[in-house]
Amino acid sequence: MAAHLPQNVGLRARVTELTGLSTGQVITIGVATVALTPIVLPVLRPVLKATIKTGVTAFEKTKQAIAETGEILADIAAEAKAEARTDSLKAVTQAGPVQSAANEN
């Protein structure tokens, strides 16, 4: 889209090209936004607050679930390590004492 614009075109011209709005329309939208923000923001405040609260709650629950999963995996890894040690000790005791070639001579 920007390929047909000359290289020395300013940002305002590029934004106008992308949005299709004239400079006057963009200024009108900006002024309206500044003028209406103090009126709209108090109305939207409870909605924004509830949305943020839901996000924080979801984050905390997710964080807790990840921590619990980590603990479970650590327990499983510790159990597996202990079983591996037990298995290797059983294998050594079942094989009996190892005689060296020097003792056979």
Image (cartoon, helix red, strand yellow):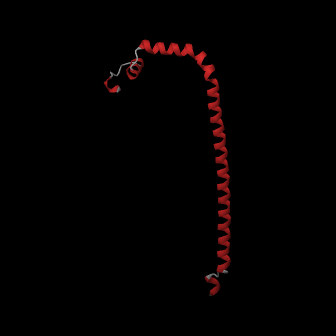
Q: Is residue 97 above or below residue 19?
A: below
Q: What percent of the width, then of the height, locates residue 46? A: 64, 26
**Residue 15's quadrant in the figure?**
top left
- Nearest the viewer among 13 and 64 is 64
Residue at (64, 35) in percent of width and height:
54
Name the quadrant of the C terminus. Answer: bottom right
The residue furthest left is: 4
**Residue 17's quadrant in the figure?**
top left
- Nearest the viewer among 67 and 55 is 55
Q: Is residue 24 left or right of residue 83?
A: left
Disc count in the image?
0
Residue at (42, 13) in percent of width and height:
23
Residue at (34, 27) in percent of width and height:
1
Q: Is residue 56 above or below residue 69?
A: above
**Residue 13's quadrant in the figure?**
top left
Q: Is residue 91 above or below residue 66?
A: below
Residue at (65, 51) in percent of width and height:
70
- Nearest the viewer among 105 and 7 is 7
Q: What percent of the width, then of the height, locates residue 41? A: 61, 20
Q: What percent of the width, then of the height, locates residue 75? A: 68, 57
Q: What percent of the width, then of the height, locates residue 32? A: 52, 14
